[in-house]
Amino acid sequence: GGVATQSENPSDKNPPDGDRLLAKAHILSVDDSAVNQLVMESILRPLVRKLSSCMDGPDTLDVLEEGCDLPDIILLDVMMPSMSGLEVCRILRERYSPTQLPIVLVSGKSSKESIVEGLAAGANDYVTKPFDSAELLSRVKGQLMAAAMAKAEVQDAGTETIHRKMLPPAILRSWEARPAGEEVAEELEHASVLCAAIEGYSMLTSHASTREVVQALSALCLGFDELCEAGDAWRVQSAPDSYMVVAGQSQTDDDDHAARLATIGLDMIKVARSISHPVCPGSLKIRVAVHSGPVRNGVVAGSLPRYFVCGDTVDLTSRIVELTQPMTVTVSASSQRRLGQFQCLSLGRRRIGETCELETFVVKDKSSAWEAALECARRRSSIRSTTTTSSLLQDVPKYLASPLSASTTPATPVPKAPAHRPGKLQVVAVDDGFLDSGAASDVSHDDSSTLGASDLSASVERSVASPASQRRAGAPRTAPAARESRKRPQQPPAALEQQQQQQHQQHQQLAI
């Protein structure tokens, strides 16, 4: 039942139009005389949105207590049975302020004492009977306009308070000083962004009741808001499972914005630890990340202006928090350089997204689980080393896994093997590190062979060369031990196969 006013536009400083307010008003007429009610109806009915009537004081109090449609103004008779208009006015003033519910007393008593008594009871105005309709309408419009202006001032003050809580001072000054219709958009060369994400948010919202979720999140956000207000940081709109804060919006701001956010992040962990988890045993757990860099910010205008930030710094902060251990504060190298009073331990370089790689640090503090983050980084480094070794082993020539593989791998590069006949592959045995062409044998090859020709060709080209090729390339002649090996008698096929299997097992163990 509030009055619709022009105060919806805070920039409109002109007083509201009385005729328009009257046309939108709901007026309650209280009088024990049916004749007086008819007079009021004849005057007001064509001009107002709604006209209600009550015949006595108790009925009036009951109607207002229901609160379905609170009138914009009450025309209250003073002389009534069972309860006078002055008594009703005093009771209503205990419930409603003069701007919330204006009251105009209408009485046949025109003495100065009666008027003073009526105004002292809490009435906004006093009209004596008999009254002129134009005078009555003027007084009604005056009270509607006064109430509308008072509400507009309260609304402006509330809006200003909201703006001061939602917008940084530098952005607020730009917003207030901007020309009509112009947006506020600025770029900051140096700023810091904090992102705090709730660990297990999906499980929390899926298994806890709605009341439990709201209570937990309300307690968490209330604590975070108090920290941000004390730390000169400003919250920005983010995903439901995260809480994003920006510091350093002023171009003249000190270079301590990263340190302020690191302090806020550690205090956020303390707040989360004080809130019980509705589903899991223990407290809520959060992950906090801080990153510094250029930021674009401004005000997105609407029914309620909102502070807005964007840029690579904001995106990277959201990605870093995904790699952060629960109950720890992870900072990037750009933020770590600004944290002189904090001890930060390197977690190594991490790939952030598809194209970016950053070195991250964990802030060492007794309130956080920094040891777990450091241990996780060590394990990740160990796994990376193992993965690198495995990838190198995959490059071992395939001939090592073949029964036809040689006993050892040449320690030095050798020239390429000479071309062989199509369909025939020359396999050269290697003994004691020397190549022995006398031990070579022709092996038939077809498409059904277990070892592909391309595999053998690659192996032979990488590791096998004949003595003739070595001599043409200027390599030293075959060693005497290798020449002696030519005189060794050919072993039976079964013994040769057993020896090759043993060599194969040795090479597999070497590869492992």
Image (cartoon, helix red, strand yellow):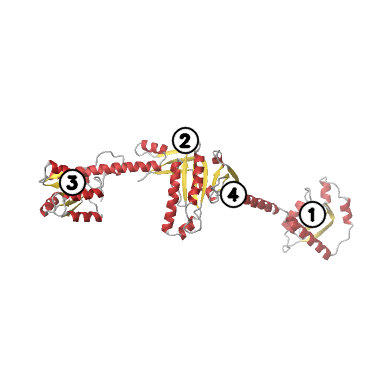
Q: Are the residues at dot 1 and dot 4 in contact (C-beta closer than 8 Å)?
A: no
Identity of the residue drawn at 83% across and 64% down: 495
Mark 2 residue type: Asp
Mark 1 residue type: Thr
Q: CA distance from mark 1 to mark 3?
A: 111 Å
> Residue pushed farthest top?
252
Residue at disc 2, secondary structure: loop
Crowding at dot 2, Cα within 10 Å, few <14 / some 14-19 / many 20+, comes out as few
Q: Are the residues at dot 1 and dot 3 in contact (C-beta closer than 8 Å)?
A: no
Residue at disc 4, secondary structure: helix
Mark 4 residue type: Glu
Q: CA distance from mark 4 to mark 3?
A: 72 Å
> Residue pushed farthest bottom?
494
Q: Position of residue 301 (x, y in %)?
A: 37, 43
Q: CA distance from mark 1 to mark 4?
A: 46 Å
Q: Position of residue 499 (x, y in %)?
A: 81, 61
Q: Which mark is residue 408?
A: 1
Crowding at dot 4, Cα within 10 Å, few <14 / some 14-19 / many 20+, comes out as some
Q: CA distance from mark 2 to mark 4?
A: 33 Å
Residue at disc 3, secondary structure: strand
481, 419: nearer the viewer? 481
Q: Position of residue 420 (x, y in %)?
A: 78, 55
Identity of the residue drawn at 32% across and 41% down: 157
Mark 3 residue type: Val
* Residue identified by numbered label 2: 253
109, 25: nearer the viewer? 109
Left or right: residue 345 versus residue 120 is right
* Residue identified by numbered label 3: 104
Q: Which mark is residue 371?
A: 4
Task: Look at the image and tell me whether residue 404 can be seen.
Answer: no
Q: Earlier in the sequence, mark 2 or mark 3?
A: 3
